[in-house]
Amino acid sequence: MKITLQQVKNLGMGEIISYSGDEALKKVKQNGHALQRVKEQTPEICLEAVKQNGFTLQYVKKQTPEICLEAVKQNGHALQRVKEQTPEICLEAVKQNGFTLQYVKKQTPEICLEAVKQNGHALQYVDESIFKKEKVTIELTQEQLDKIKNLI
């Protein structure tokens, strides 16, 4: 089946919109997903987009540590879209949402502990081998301890 451009436009999907400059900045502040329609991405525009919606990191052409950090602060699950994870980025992601531990490529005791503090159910994603090398002590609230007990 062939469809013409005019038919697509009649469906309301055919108009190709792109933004640039100040208009682009304004649009991504309103809706981060507008980043996918930005002609020339600048670090400032990308930063504003991920502050509005962390998942728009997927549309960032040139990721920087600063942009990735802001993305995971807004939504920890944006860690899935981070091309080059750093311990700092991973730590911020699990502080925002403990379940994002499942996306951490190189777990450390500190990252795992923060994830479990944020959400006891993140314990299921902890790579136990990192704790066999050293003794780790953690302080948990009674509520956190109860959540972990429910998992066992």
Image: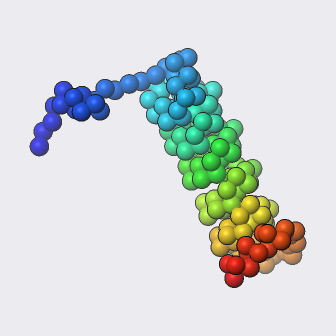
Q: In percent of the image, x 55 and y 44: which residue is there? A: 55
- Residue 26 quadrant: top right
In the rendered image, the quadrant that contains the C terminus is: bottom right
**Where does the image place residue 42, in percent across and percent down from the top left?**
58, 26
> What colour scheme has been applied to the protein in the rendered image?
rainbow
**Where does the image place residue 100, in percent across and percent down from the top left?**
63, 59
- Residue 145 quadrant: bottom right
Q: In percent of the image, x 73 and y 75: which residue is there? A: 148
* Left or right position of 19 against 8: right
Q: Is residue 6 visible?
A: yes
In the rendered image, the quadrant that contains the N terminus is: top left
Task: Please state which of residues 138 and 108 is positioned toward the viewer in this rendering.
Answer: 138
- Residue 60 quadrant: top right
Q: Where 35 sits versus 79, above or below?
A: above
Q: In percent of the image, x 67 and y 40: which residue is there? A: 70
Q: Where 91 sits versus 48, above or below?
A: below
Q: Where 110 sits versus 84, above or below?
A: below
* Left or right position of 75 against 87: left
Q: Is residue 112 visible?
A: no
**Where does the image place residue 143, in percent across and percent down from the top left?**
79, 69
Q: Where 48 sits versus 106, above or below?
A: above
Task: Please state which of residues 116 and 101 is positioned toward the viewer in this rendering.
Answer: 116
Q: Residue furthest left?
A: 1
Q: Residue furthest bottom?
A: 152
Task: Please state which of residues 25 and 150 is positioned toward the viewer in this rendering.
Answer: 150
**Where does the image place residue 39, in percent across and percent down from the top left?**
46, 25
